[in-house]
Image (cartoon, rainbow, N blue to C red):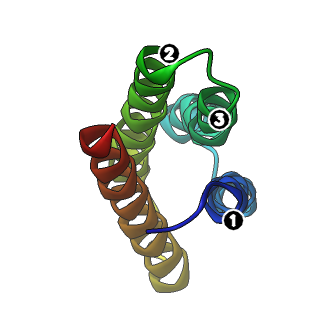
């Protein structure tokens, strides 16, 4: 299993990668609104996981980890909605980020089920 420090780094990198991805997009109205939501949710994955690690007990850890998992799921949703307008390179980045959101979701689920 990934230790706390590594997962904190990984969630931070996910948020940074999302921000880089957004810079590649053509920001029409829908992409603009979806990218704002994606920015928030991608950053919240790591922020909530960090909060979970500052737990007050197992119940608190599990609650905060569930929020981090929810934010990963939400990030995946926004990534699916974003339109790359047929740009293959940008679409490849979008797919990679969607896969990373799914992996983070699975890792967090495994951690939650262990607590």
The image quarter containing residue 39 is: top right
Q: Quadrant of the N terminus?
A: bottom left
Identify the residue at image location x=56%, y=39%: 45
Q: Quadrant of the C terminus?
A: top left
| Left or right for 83, reference 109 | right
Identify the residue at image location x=58%, y=63%: 3
Q: Are marks 1 and 2 in contact (CB under 8 Å)?
A: no
Q: Neighbour class for label 2 at 10 Å: few (<14), some, many (≥20)?
A: some
Q: Nearer the viewer, residue 35 or 113?
A: 113
Q: Which mark is residue 24?
A: 1
The image quarter containing residue 113 is: top left
User: How far apart are the two marked residues, 1 and 2, measured between alpha carbons?
Assistant: 38 Å
Number of marks in picture: 3
Coordinates of residue 79 in the picture (x, y in percent): 42, 50
For numbered disc 2, what is the local secondary structure? helix
Q: Nearer the viewer, mark 1 or mark 2?
A: 2
Q: Which residue is mark 2?
A: 60
Coordinates of residue 33 in the picture (x, y in percent): 56, 28
For numbered disc 3, what is the local secondary structure? helix
- Compared with residue 45, is residue 2 higher up or lower down, i.e. above or below? below
């Amino acid at each position: 299993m990934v230790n706390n420090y590594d997962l904190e780094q990984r969630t931070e990198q996910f948020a940074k990668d999302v921000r880089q991805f957004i810079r590649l997009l053509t920001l029409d109205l829908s992409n603009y609104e979806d990218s704002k939501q994606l920015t928030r949710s991608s950053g919240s994955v790591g922020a909530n996981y960090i909060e979970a690690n500052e737990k007050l007990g197992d119940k608190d850890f599990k609650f905060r980890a569930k929020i981090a998992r929810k934010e990963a799921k939400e990030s995946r949703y926004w990534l699916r909605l974003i339109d790359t307008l047929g740009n293959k390179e940008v679409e490849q980045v979008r797919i990679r980020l969607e896969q990373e959101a799914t992996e983070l979701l699975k890792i967090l689920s495994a951690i939650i089920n262990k607590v």
